[in-house]
Amino acid sequence: MATHTLAVLVENSPGVLARVAGLFSRRAYNIDSLAVGPTENPNISRMTIVLNVEGHALEQVIRQLDKLVNVIQIAEVIPDESVQAELLLVKVSATTRNRFDVDAVVEKYDAKVVDSDASSVTIEATGEAAKIADLLSDLEQFGIRELVQSGLIALERGGTSLSDRTLSTQGIPIADGGVQADYQN
């Protein structure tokens, strides 16, 4: 199976996330990563969905997503043509004996310590999935007490945005207000 990243623009309204997740659940597709957040337009949210599927299944997922009423646009994000990152917060055991070693790992990955006490250190890191995985691997020796990852987020390289390409062609104002067109599928 191949990993694919989809950028999905949706209405910023209650229940949209549940409908999208339900679509994947009903078709027995597993979502590897899902990140949802606001865009430059307060009426629009962006979902970044990472999944492992092959060609026909990917086309089917895209067609099914496109049928959902609140979905505005779907685009596959190509890794070589985008900037991709994850956010990690991880709490590791740290004592006076190993604190110097923990700090060395933090520095190696351009991460930063965001909280500490006598027995632990909380580290924040951003970067590509491989960097995050390597950091976690190096931190295991100290004892990972808790962690949370954001899931992948991605933007295409260059000056044009998904919103520019999509919303303006459908008559939806990009960020300056105005009347929103009826783009419902």
Image (tube, grey):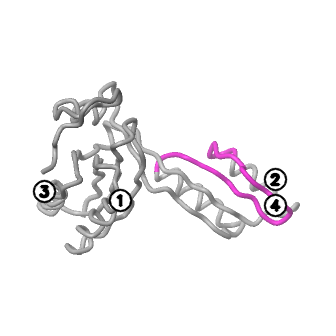
* C-alpha distance separating marks 2 and 1: 47 Å
Circle on res. 63: 3
Q: Is residue 113 magenta?
A: yes
Q: Which amino acid type corresponds to the residue marked 3 in the rendered image?
A: Arg
Do residues under tags 3 and 2 come within 8 Å of each other at their CB atoms? no
**Above or below, 105 relative to 118:** above
Q: Residues within 10 Å of mark 2 (few under 14, many from 20)?
A: few
Measuring 22% from the left and 74% from the top, which residue is drawn there? 26
Q: In which image quadrant can residue 146 be found?
A: bottom right
Which residue in the structure is indicated by mark 1?
14
Which residue in the structure is indicated by mark 4?
98
Q: Position of residue 108 (x, y in %)?
A: 66, 45
Q: Residues within 10 Å of mark 4 (few under 14, many from 20)?
A: few
Closer mark to the observer between disc 3 and disc 4:
3
Q: Residues within 10 Å of mark 1 (few under 14, many from 20)?
A: few
* C-alpha distance separating marks 1 and 4: 47 Å
